[in-house]
Amino acid sequence: MTKSAVMSSKGQLVIPVRLREELGFKPGVRVVFKKQGNALLIESANYEAVLALRGKYAGFPLEEDLAEARRNWEERLEAM
């Protein structure tokens, strides 16, 4: 499916409703942007597991550690 949108002066885009529904993008969902060549990939970020640990591990930099581990993994995959 090919859809288009116009970027606002603030850099905002509206994702068409059908695509949001198919992908499960609801208000408040956190997304991750990835550059792949000349393309931009938008994925929902699964932070529910991280958020579930908040009380027990408050102050522990788990989210940052996971993000760094993911970046390292992606760099290794690109090097292959």
Image (cartoon, grey):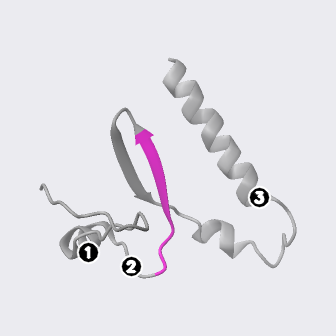
For this orientation, the residue located farthest to the bottom is 27
Q: Position of residue 30 (x, y in %)?
A: 51, 69
Q: Position of residue 79 (x, y in %)?
A: 53, 19
Q: Position of residue 69 (x, y in %)?
A: 68, 42
Q: CA distance from mark 1 to mark 2?
A: 8 Å
Packing grade of label 2 (10 A; few <14, some 14-19, many >=20) is few
Q: Label 2, secondary structure: give it.
A: loop
Dividing the image into 4 quarters, which one contains the N terminus? Answer: bottom left
Q: Earlier in the sequence, mark 3 or mark 2?
A: 2
Closer to us: mark 3 or mark 2? 2
Q: Are the residues at dot 1 and dot 2 in contact (C-beta closer than 8 Å)? A: no
Q: Which residues are magenta?
A: 28-35
Look at label 1 and name its amino acid: Glu
Packing grade of label 1 (10 A; few <14, some 14-19, many >=20) is few
Which label sits on residue 26? Answer: 2
Nearer to us in this view, 38 or 67? 38
- Tell me the residue at 51%/61% (across/down): 45
Q: Earlier in the sequence, mark 3 or mark 1?
A: 1
Above or below residue 32? Residue 51 is: below
Q: Label 1, secondary structure: give it.
A: helix
Residue beneath label 3, please?
A: 62
Residue beneath label 1, please?
A: 21
Above or below residue 42? Residue 74 is: above
Tell me which secondary structure the magenta stretch mostly adopts.
Answer: strand
Look at label 3 and name its amino acid: Leu
Q: Quadrant of residue 5?
A: bottom left
